[in-house]
Image (cartoon, helix red, strand yellow):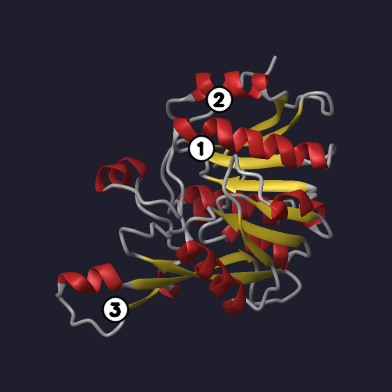
Amino acid sequence: MLLFILGQSALEGVKISPKEKRNRGPPAVGDMEDMVRENDGVTAGDPAAVQEMTTVSVHHFGNPVEAEDGFSVTIIENMKEEYGLFVWPCSVILAEYVWQQRSRFSGAAVVELGAGTSLPGLVAAKVGADVTLTDDSSRPEVIANMRRQCGINNLECKVMGLTWGLWDSNVFDLHPDIILGADVLYDSNAFDDLFATVTFLLESSPSSVFITSYHNRSGHHLIEFLMVKWGLKCVKLLDGFSFMPPHKASGLSGDIQLVEIALASNHTTES
């Protein structure tokens, strides 16, 4: 029997407190030599400069020098406290998993939930997936930033608001083969809505799977209960660092795991 343990973490695109930031560890910023900071014209040393600062991080997959062997994805991060638009370690790990599983993603219909900076979804698009990026409908600044990410990477992804647990008309048009979610297990009050949405999308394409990366902290008992409630099960569970290249893993921290979840009636559990 496979023990399924998930944890509570924070979600990119959602306002988080300084305490939560400390608990979560530093954001992942890609290769440091590729990070560019801009203060949007605010005088250096002014506290407002920190609030207005944006970061452009470049994330490499495979060998970006040779087009056939890899590529780079550029991400705009907003350092404003109210936005929380950072590339967190869970996003880097899920994006690397997409890259390493690229043959599986090529030609697939992919929906990313709580996409925020959208790194995993953008990698999926780079390897040939038909990608829809989604985040909370009440966060227009996050939705707008997702469109910017697509533009600077020359990718034509669909971008839409999708609030977990709400059934807008756009949701009924989604029939994904793969659902992605990096760091979406952050607030136990939202777990039921998240699993309701995941279950609805899985049922719209019964052979589909939900792949999520998460910090292994508290909250797993409630998640296990909700999986049973919604007729879901774990079909694969991995240590998030087990497949990471050493040079990427060295820049990340935390106890991060990756899980694939499917409808209980459609898949055989893997270790």
Q: Position of residue 135 (x, y in %)?
A: 56, 55
Q: Are marks 1 and 3 in contact (CB under 8 Å)?
A: no
Which quadrant: the C terminus?
Answer: top right
Q: In terms of secondary structure, where does tag 2 sit?
A: helix
- Residue at image position (51%, 23%) is 220
Please give the label number shown on residue 39.
3
Give the number of callouts. Answer: 3
**Quarter of the view holding residue 85:** bottom left
The residue mark sitting in front, 3 or 2, is 2
Callout 2 environment at 10 Å: few (<14), some (14 to 19), or many (20+)? Answer: many
Q: Are marks 1 and 2 in contact (CB under 8 Å)?
A: yes
Q: Are marks 3 and 2 in contact (CB under 8 Å)?
A: no
The kind of residue on which mark 1 rests is Leu
- According to the picture, the residue beneath numbered tag 2 turns out to be 223
Q: Earlier in the sequence, mark 1 or mark 2?
A: 1
Q: CA distance from mark 3 to mark 2?
A: 41 Å
The kind of residue on which mark 2 rests is Ile
Please give the label number shown on residue 185.
1
Going by the picture, which residue comes out furthest to the bottom? 41
Of residues 236 and 7, which is closer to you in this image? Answer: 7
| Residue 6 drawn above or below residue 258 | above
